[in-house]
Image (cartoon, rainbow, N blue to C red):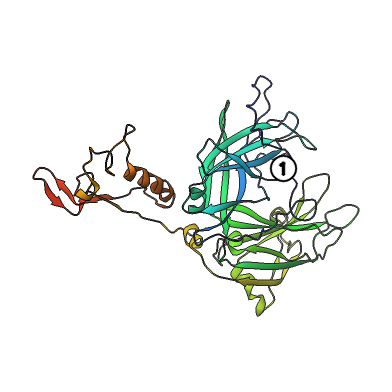
Amino acid sequence: MPPSQGYQVAQPQPAPLPSTYTANPELSGQGPLGAGGIKSVQAKGANAGTVILNFSCRGLRDRDVLSKSDPQLLLYTSMKGRANYALQGKTEKVKNNLNPVFGTSIDIPYIFEKQTFCKVVVVDDDSDGVSSSADNLGEAEFTLGQAVSKKTLEVELVHRRWGPKGSCQISASHTTVTKELVTLQFEGSHLDKKDTFGKSDPFYEIYRMTGGHEALVKRSEVVYNNLNPRWRQVEMTSSQLCGCDDETKIKIKVYDYDEASAPDLIGECTTTLKEMKKIKKEIVQWDLIHPKKQAKKKSYKNSGVLKILQCISVKSYSFLDYVSSGLQLNCMVAFDFTASNGHPNTPASLHHLNAQGVNQYTMAWTAIGQVIQDYDWDKLFPAYGFGGALPPNQQVSFEFALNANP
């Protein structure tokens, strides 16, 4: 974790946030931690669905005098260009943390044929209730296509006055008509006692591991004063849980909840969806390991045991499944140069350039290329023509490169 930076009194006040900002959103789910729920979404077509974004940040600017910033992330989206952003959703507030991992996911409607612009704004909210203002820690822009086509997208956070500081990691999963819905239920046994005047108040968090990055996808309810808790069933898509890959590493961390301070780690374990599915034939359980205790004591065994009671999944595929799994779209275009289109100097011709230097062909191809480019790694689109009379002999060709490069 990078060292926190002290607050400087001489710094100018940050630029105001958009007027649609409201601090401290009402968290979804059950319990004081605001566990995010999975929404039921019906896609409108084969190329449509809902993309679910999870967020974390690193190295945020410190805006508090006696403690660290209390970051919250706001997501704005637009399908009409970068000048028409509207608030799409916001995460919970994480207290005293310059490297927060947000547990609240944000859903965005996905339509392949349309380009969705996104902007994240990270703020420091010190209020205990609803506040009309907060300190801006930085913001960044990206497209939904960029997030979908990468496992984890990292963007630099830039303050409008103070410049770049910190980064935001965006992990995308999705819900479509065709999906794998996973139902899990866990119980703990013989957990470590963390409270002085009582037993532990355990809850767990499930993380998807992608390229060394941990994306928080589910947080359970708190079971109070119990060292052998049985938590309620939770549901999520396999895309959220493991990126539709049964062998992707999944980390489960069990904590002791504390009302007055940060939760204490009881222990953690690593597994896969493939391993959890073995419950149909055998008992599946894991030792909960506290890394610091393990390093200090040679006789250390565990800080309790986590057992899976239920793992049920139903699976199918969609177009969005292929795109989010890394499918690259390579596009080639050919323009009609035959006489049926008319002479380019005639305004009625599709090849006629207007005062802005564009025609119907270039407008159509620009609209298509802006969408396709997010799914094409080299962003190069071969362009050809047919039916044109080529110099120097004015011989008609039915296949030629527009840049005259054979």
Q: Which x, y percent locates residue 398? A: 18, 54
Q: Residue at coordinates 74% horizontally, 49% vertically from top-left?
A: 27
Q: Which x, y percent locates residue 350? A: 29, 44
Q: Secondary structure at mark 1?
A: loop
Q: Is residue 7 above or below residue 389?
A: above
Q: Which x, y percent locates residue 178? A: 56, 66
Q: Residue at coordinates 54% horizontally, 65% vertically from top-left?
A: 245
Quickly name the residue at label 1: 93
| Number of disc labels | 1
Q: Residue at coordinates 14% horizontally, 51% vertically from top-left?
A: 396
The residue positioned farthest toward the left in the image shown: 393
The residue positioned farthest toward the bottom in the image shown: 281
Quadrant of res 161: top right
Q: Is residue 192 left or right of residue 163?
A: right
Quadrant of res 126: top right
The amino acid type found where label 1 is placed reads Lys
Comparing 340 with 45, the one in front is 340
Comparing 299 with 338, the one in front is 338
Comparing 32 with 95, the one in front is 32
Q: Is residue 45 left or right of residue 336?
A: right
Badge 1: residue crowd in 10 Å (few <14, some 14–19, many ≥20) = many
Q: Is residue 371 left or right of residue 167?
A: left
The residue positioned farthest toward the right in the image shown: 197
Looking at the image, can residue 206 be seen? yes
The residue positioned farthest toward the top in the image shown: 10
Q: Is residue 64 above or below residue 387?
A: above
Quadrant of res 219: bottom right
Q: Which x, y percent locates residue 388? A: 18, 48
Looking at the image, can residue 62 be seen? no
- Locate the N terminus by quadrant: top right
